[in-house]
Amino acid sequence: MSAPYKIYLEEDQIPKKYYNIRADMPEQHDPLLNPATGQPATLEELKSVFCDELARQELDTTTRYFDIPKPVLEFYKMFRPSPVIRAYNLEKALGTPAKIYYKFEGNNTSGSHKLNSAAAQVHYAKEQGLTSLTTETGAGQWGTALSMAAAFFGMDLTVYMVRASAEQKPYRKAVIETFGAGIVPSPSNTTEVGRAILKEHPDTGGSLGCAISEAVEQAGNTPNCRYVLGSVLNQVLLHQSIIGLESKAALDSIDEYPDIVIGCAGGGSNLGGLIGAYMQDSLKGKSDTRFVAVEPASCPSLTRGRYVYDFCDTGKITPLARMYTLGSQFMPSADHAGGLRYHGMSPILSKLYHDGYMEAVSVHQTKVFEAAVMFAKHETILPAPESAHAIRTAIDEALECKKTGEEKMILFGLTGTGYFDMQAYSSYLEGVMVDYVPTDSELEIGFSQLPNIA
Amino acid sequence: MSAPYKIYLEEDQIPKKYYNIRADMPEQHDPLLNPATGQPATLEELKSVFCDELARQELDTTTRYFDIPKPVLEFYKMFRPSPVIRAYNLEKALGTPAKIYYKFEGNNTSGSHKLNSAAAQVHYAKEQGLTSLTTETGAGQWGTALSMAAAFFGMDLTVYMVRASAEQKPYRKAVIETFGAGIVPSPSNTTEVGRAILKEHPDTGGSLGCAISEAVEQAGNTPNCRYVLGSVLNQVLLHQSIIGLESKAALDSIDEYPDIVIGCAGGGSNLGGLIGAYMQDSLKGKSDTRFVAVEPASCPSLTRGRYVYDFCDTGKITPLARMYTLGSQFMPSADHAGGLRYHGMSPILSKLYHDGYMEAVSVHQTKVFEAAVMFAKHETILPAPESAHAIRTAIDEALECKKTGEEKMILFGLTGTGYFDMQAYSSYLEGVMVDYVPTDSELEIGFSQLPNIA
């Protein structure tokens, strides 16, 4: 084994610029719409929700590279470059001729890639002179990441945490509080949206869409405050492009290039970030790499959703985005473990998928946890359930290579670690985990409430 | 800032040999004694408890370096080299002229340095043809590390987990089970020792010493099985020497050498491993580095214990070791959070301390958590409570430098991460954490039950 297990770039090799994939897309996704006017959301309108620089980034389709601000680069040095790792021991256990690499983004206290965008977003807000931020968190990775960045840059932060998650994951909540952020279980009585939802569903465990509505409303009612979001948005994919750029630089250093790039897909932050640098080559006709989005069978926005305009939140107060969606009122089953529970999908990724540049598969969660346990035993990293979706498909592709004898190079994104997901692991180990898959008529309910826009 | 935040050696720079500090000690510690005969424990006697190679390592005072077996080196490549990190942001927050470095051993799923010795111990057992192992775990780091190594090398493992810990940390338990090990909350009715303790104290939460007794007994009653221990023993300090060797190689690469080396001290596995390579220089008169052991004020074996022969376990079935001890019947207060709760201390470290080569301080846990939260906010790593003892003292030394203007170089061991310790963090944040310090008369109870050996 001449190539190392882990490839760490030097600190001065951390990418200095974010890559904006829109500059290379043959066609742009349809614009965000202001639901009040039905017209494309303007920069000024976005600035009332997001801080100025992030609003600019959200709409920019032509600037190919954005300089990473120096304070953000310095912050990154505490946990980046993250390693690209060759899964030698998993390959051996599978007996596959395929080469399996993974980009590991879990080696920081947030336990995921979310810290990449959190640092950028807090920095831009700070630079604008804002003093506080609001956000939502579901599984808790984004809330943790943002609390870390807020603590570091000195910014007040209120996190609307999906109530069910806050109750099931008291330790995740405690980590966020350790970094000094305030937590409000959502829905709450601190917002109009929250009060309305509580009135109708007093016992609800909440949803990501509902927590987004509350955080946006709260930001609007607080002086010198903006809302920030950890996925779905173009600005987030921009910041997360560092994952793909860094992994490409690392693989270049050992003359490797992936035949297949695999990422788990919830709102698309990791997947979009991971594939960016490789998709650039593909869009320019320089490679024929396959790109595979992996989503839960219980929340299948790409594989069973519709490509239409929809609200980004349950409370219907955000702009409308054209994306693959299960409908903003869709709630994944309580049997669904882990994240990847957003009803929609990044407009950029939706467009790439719609135009045939990317594939998507959905997987059952018991098969996901089977892959997670196998991976943990052979590679000694306990993966987040989200990341284990990508592991599942990487293993399936490697087993296919075993059949065909092909020596494909597979790269997948290991977005994070599973320390806060042990309830789900236990339910898998105890054999009580259920593979919930919504029926067509259940999905139809979500579709029936889509806004009526051509 | 020219020097990087993180120094990662290349994989081929992982040390190839363990360093046995005993080969350089001016005087050896007193030998282990067989309690039945009062005579030094023989190799054959130790082989009935430990696997052959580990028994040999336990008694070897002259072999300076032991080759690290190739399969163990390959295993290490999944998580080593671990980084040496410059705490630039902590330094800035403190306004100290001191340079603060830390060796971070928490970047693996066990969340601590314990995996270094776990891999070696499982490998040696496997090579001898053993099929199963038993051990104990308190806070859970050692149990997790051993379950990872056992899963990888294909070895059955039963972990006696201190009952209070198994109940307080169900997720730690779930991680160990994910890696396929069996968990028995201790005391249990699976052993004579356990049944006797349960008869006397039916509601006890257990102790590390008691779990050790059960694991040793169980190993003796199981064919082709041995007991393994994650701290205290000479063999463990030998394996953990990789921490110091690797950190020295990393610091050599940027021409740095510590004026002070600081480590938390429970049984001594991290501290002994961290200081080894530097202590070698010191013992040879090549440096005047200070070595500081940091222990909890609630379990102060070095600073308030006695340097006498004592049992290593509560059930009094292990050999006797001469060490600093609070007495094998000492139980830390329920107010004590985190690990570092062993009644004794590594015989090697006890000897070095007794002979004046090392200092020791004890710290109160609210001050420890204060340091932990400050470290997390500025360095973005959530430390284990154990590790935070070293952080506390590193900060105190850095603040002292601020007073004197000295530009000392401080190196401390960040042994692990705190994801499974959020109950303790919460109790600190909520202001309900208590600083328990045993009174002299409370300690006297433990001392009164020491074995009567000159």
Image (cartoon, coloured by chain):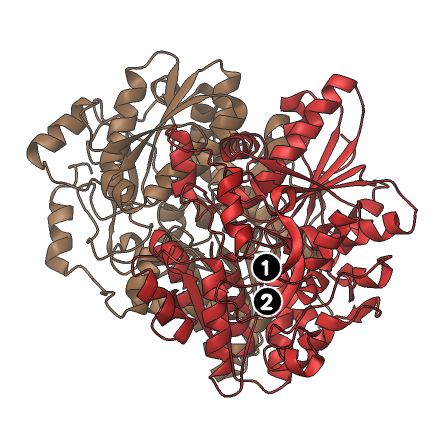
Chain colours: A red, B brown
Would residue A192 appear left or right of B410 to someone viewing this image?
A: left
Give A4 or A449, whichever is nearer the viewer. A449
| Residue B285 in the image, given as x and y percentages of width and height | 56, 55
The quadrant of the rendering that contains the C terminus of chain B is top left
| Pointer 2 with pointer 1, Cβ within 8 A | yes
Q: Residue at the far left: name it.
A: B200
Above-or-below relation of A303 to A46: above
Which residue is pictured at 70% across the width and 53% down the height? A350
- Label 1: how many Cα within 10 Å (few below 14, some 14–19, many 20+): many
Would residue A282 appear left or right of A224 to someone viewing this image?
A: right
| Residue A111 in the image, given as x and y percentages of width and height | 53, 53
- Label 2: how many Cα within 10 Å (few below 14, some 14–19, many 20+): many
Q: In this figure, what is the number of numbered marks?
A: 2
Query: Circle 1 is placed at which residue position?
Result: A114
Query: Circle 2 is placed at which residue position?
Result: A118
Which residue is pictured at 53% across the width and 17% down the height? B127
For badge 2, the amino acid type reads Ala
| Residue A291 in the image, given as x and y percentages of width and height | 75, 42
Q: Quadrant of residue A76?
A: bottom right
Above-or-below relation of A100 to A173: above
For badge 1, the amino acid type reads Lys
Give A111 or A277, whichever is nearer the viewer. A277
